[in-house]
Image (cartoon, rainbow, N blue to C red):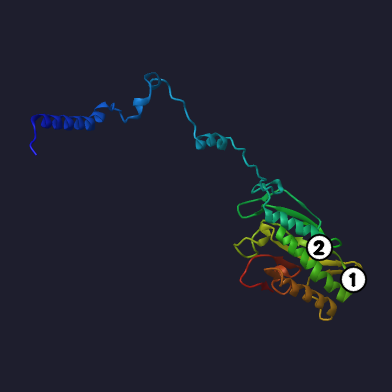
Amino acid sequence: MRRTPLAGLAALTVCSALLSGCLMPDLLVPYADPSPTAAVPVAQVDAPQPVVQTQQAMAQPQQAMAQPVFGFPNVTKPLFGGGAGNFMPAEEVQCRQQLKRLGVSFRDIPRIRDSESCGIDYPVEVRSLGRTIALKPAAKLNCAMAVEAALWAQRDLAPAARTRYLSGIAEVRQMSSYSCRKIAGSRSMSEHSKGNALDIGAIKLKNGRLISVHRPGPFAFRERSFLRKVRGEACGRFGTVLGPGYNRAHADHFHLDLKQRRSVACH
């Protein structure tokens, strides 16, 4: 088939139209800046931005204004007279409660401090070793020594008197309690210098009998048995028990103290 010049021109026109249709849409699409500020009006760019508080930021002032938590402080018994501090330690308070349970008559007295080696921080003046056992004269002791002396008088001394004399204890007569001194013939301070010792010179029974602490005669069987009994039982309570027969310094009394030792000094 032979093509004419007119047919060729028509074909060229059709191709040109198709090509123009494919390219025109790209030429008519406007340019859009991908930056987000391009969509914000100029008047809003210079305007102050509102402050947005997050939930965490709003919670901080509330935490800062939280109410304080109040507790109850440990309150101990005020110290009469002033000792090591303005308050009595808990163990001293408990010790006094035990004295009351034992029926001991006592009172707190001011701190004793005669020297660096002599004194009692929390002394008590003891007037009885039980509800019916007077202590004469009143003794100045630390509380622990007062408790042990009361236990000895009530649980050892009184039962021994009832067994051998059929009588209770009316009073215990002491020869020394607190005293700022050294052990006789020694450079060491006595336990008396800390209120940690008590010297017993005599025991008066409710029937009026007075038993002195001494070495009984060869025929004083009941008295010897009584003194040996209460002296031996004291060795189970105290750190030191000295009495007649130990030396001349202890010929007329029992020395009782709470000194801590590896083994009890019972003589």
**Residue 186 spot, x, y in % from top left:** 61, 64
Q: Nearer the viewer, residue 98 or 151?
A: 98
Query: Which residue is disc 1 drawn over?
Result: 167
Q: Nearer the viewer, residue 9 or 56?
A: 9
Task: From this view, report whether residue 191 is shown above or below residue 114.
Answer: below
Give the spatial CA distance, label 1 vs label 2: 17 Å
Task: From this view, report whether residue 100 is shown above or below residue 227.
Answer: above
**Front position among marks 1 and 2:** 1
- Placement of the N terminus among the 4 image quadrants: top left
Q: Is residue 222 left or right of residue 61?
A: right
SS label for mark 1: loop
Labels 1 and 2 touching (C-beta < 8 A)? no
Q: Residue at x 55, y 34 (%)?
A: 61
Q: Which amino acid does the dot numbered 1 rest on? A: Ser
Q: Residues within 10 Å of mark 2 (few under 14, many from 20)?
A: many
Q: Is residue 212 visible?
A: no
Q: Which amino acid does the dot numbered 2 rest on? A: Arg
Q: Is residue 189 left or right of residue 78?
A: left
- Placement of the C terminus among the 4 image quadrants: bottom right
**Residue 119 spot, x, y in % from top left:** 66, 53
The single residue placed furthest to the top in the displayed view is 43
The single residue placed furthest to the front in the displayed view is 1
Query: Which residue is disc 2 drawn over?
Result: 173
**Residue 57 spot, x, y in % from top left:** 50, 35
Q: Say how many tags the image has.
A: 2
Q: Residue at x 18, y 31 (%)?
A: 14
